Image (cartoon, helix red, strand yellow):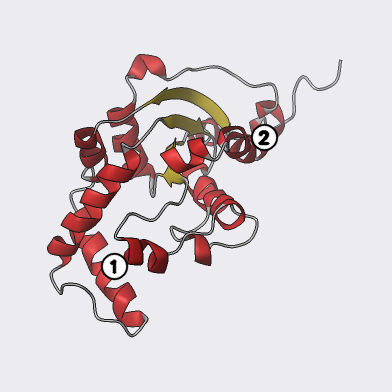
Amino acid sequence: MAEMKNEFAKEKSLVVIKPDGIQRGLIGEIIKRYENTGLKLVALKMFIPAPDFVEKHYLVDPEWPIKTGTKTIKSYKDKGENPPSEDPLEITRKVLDNLKKYISSGPVVAMVWQGAHAVGLIRKITGSTEPLTSDVGTIRGDYTIDSYSLADIDGRAIRNLIHASGTPEEAEKEIALWFHPEEINEYRLINEAMLYDVNLDGILE
């Protein structure tokens, strides 16, 4: 049982603080939010991604174009509005162009976080894709005010501070794109004993 728990604790997720998060001076606050849960930061770097790299990131999931276009069309119709096209791939091409311009506009901070339920916890802490509908207490809900409506009016990508992997499988592919294996550190935090050690060995002298 202990071995299974230890393997479970090795789940990893990619988090990227986008250019608006950097410009807003939120790097420390964002890291603090994830750190406070007990997740472990195992990799971190800052750079300006090229547009081609941003495209590779979003296309790491081959189903992303059709899923994104379909979701966008549904979102328009749910609001009683006409989508700019009924073709999901045509819509996604515009979405991707906007994302490439947005993410490559300045430095980003890319991180790998590790711990039990890492992907799910990070998604919960980060909040939903649209800041307007993100819950109070989430990073997006607390620190930005953007919405799909504002982004549509301006013809740009929604500025939501962070990218976070959606599933463990997606995280594995994204991490392989953003980091070389030797850039991911293996080490132990003292507080991991409180989170994972079955018998809390070593607390008492």
Against 55, residue 127 (above or below) is below
Residue drawn at x 15%, y 74% as measured from the top left: 86
Specify few, some or many for label 1: CA neighbours under 10 Å numbering under 14, 14-19, or 20 or more: few
Whole-percent x and y of residue 161? 47, 46
User: Of residues 174 and 193, which is closer to you in this image?
Assistant: 174
Check residue 195 in the rendering and tell me which mark sits there, or answer none: 2
The answer, for residue 97, to whether it is visible in the render is: yes
User: Of residues 1 and 135, which is closer to you in this image?
Assistant: 135
Against 183, residue 82 (above or below) is below
The answer, for residue 18, to whether it is visible in the render is: no
In the picture, residue 198 is in which quadrant? top right
Whole-percent x and y of residue 93? 16, 55
Whole-percent x and y of residue 71? 29, 67
Which of pointers 1 and 2 lies earlier in the amino acid sequence? 1
For mark 2, give the secondary structure. helix
Against 110, residue 181 (above or below) is above
Residue drawn at x 28%, y 68% as measured from the top left: 72
Question: In which quadrant of the rendered image does the C terminus lie?
Answer: top right
Question: In which quadrant of the rendered image does the N terminus lie?
Answer: top right
Residue highlighted by disc 1 = 71
**Which amino acid type is shown beneath numbered disc 2?**
Leu
Could you give the CA–CA distance between mark 1 and mark 2, rounded to whole angstroms?
A: 37 Å
Check residue 106 in the rendering and tell me which mark sits there, or answer none: none
